[in-house]
Amino acid sequence: MDTMDTAVAKASVLTEALPYIQDFRGSVVLVKLGGSVMEVESNLESLMDDVAFMRAVGMKVVIVHGGGKAISKAIKESGHEPKFVDGLRVTDEQTMEIVRRTLNNVVNPDLVRRLQARGANARPLHGNWLFAARRITDPDRGYVGEVVKADARAVVEMLDAGIIPVVTPLGTGVEDDHLYNINADFAAAALAKALKVRKFALVSDVPGLLKDPQDPSTLFSTLHLGDVETLKADGVISGGMLPKIESCADAIRAGVKKVHLVDGRMAHSLLLEIFTREGVGTEITE
């Protein structure tokens, strides 16, 4: 393909995206980032490019991020082993401090810096300013909380000012004012509901929901809420996918229209999800 053909092809892509750009301009889209894609430089750079592009064409983007790999690494460096129950991290007092420090001082500033380097006006927003939390019922999990309420006022103010809020999944206890570790999928879903977002995309290191985790061809392109309990009972939805699907289902029930599991290992997966008819990953619907 010569230079002119290449230029024409690029122009064709832009004109194809135009209706989607017009449709989503001014819409609020919440992107949850997590999994090992945050540890792979090329994947993270591609995702940051996508978010900066989305903001540049007028979309109001919110990021809620996890930090699982970085937190587990920090815990191991402290001489302890990370522990999980049903996909949720066991968080004692010492682990809670490691979680707070890693999210607020390492992961969050890195994402903000990457976006700012692309001309996107991103700012940190610590989740304990937004999320009121209550300790989950299992006492063996320590300071792991569930969201009681998400106060979205600060997020709305930032969005209206053209800022991308980058939010950590931490909460403040409604009963004890203690800091709580909240699963990032649940935190993102709670904020998506409070904002009534146009689209909620969960980006991770899997193609979506797979019937066979070892076989990408078994991807569920669409998952209906009525099938979730059966798939949980069959063991198809388990481990780290369990809180992810539960958070998606909760968001759909609360009125969020579009929820997608997106594979962050695919170059520009967010742009493919937003600006193409087919999209990628698994779409969660009623």
Image (cartoon, grey):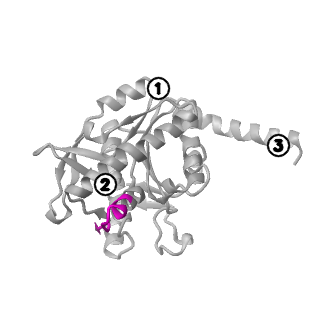
The outermost residue toward the right is 2
Between 75 and 26, the one nearer to me in the picture: 75
Q: CA distance from mark 2 to mark 1?
A: 27 Å
Q: Nearer the viewer, mark 3 or mark 1?
A: 1
Answer with mark 3 or mark 2, whichever residue precedes in sequence: 3
- Decide: few, some or many residues near mark 2? Use Cα within 10 Å; few <14, some 14-19, many ≥20: many
Up-down relation of residue 165 to residue 69 (above or below): above
Residue at the image position 35 percent from the left and 69 percent from the top: 239
Residue 128 in picture, x, y percent from top left: 26, 41
Q: Amino acid at mark 3?
A: Thr
The mark found on residue 6 in the picture is 3
Location of the C terminus (image quadrant) = bottom left
Tell me the element at label 2: loop
Up-down relation of residue 268 to residue 236 (above or below): above
Tell me the element at label 1: loop
Residue, disc 2:
183
Horizontal side of 41 relative to 60 (left or right) equals: right
Q: Which residues are magenta?
A: 74-84
Q: Is there CB contact under 8 Å for labels 3 and 1?
A: no
Q: Nearer the viewer, mark 3 or mark 2?
A: 2
Up-down relation of residue 164 to residue 233 (above or below): above
The outermost residue toward the left is 175
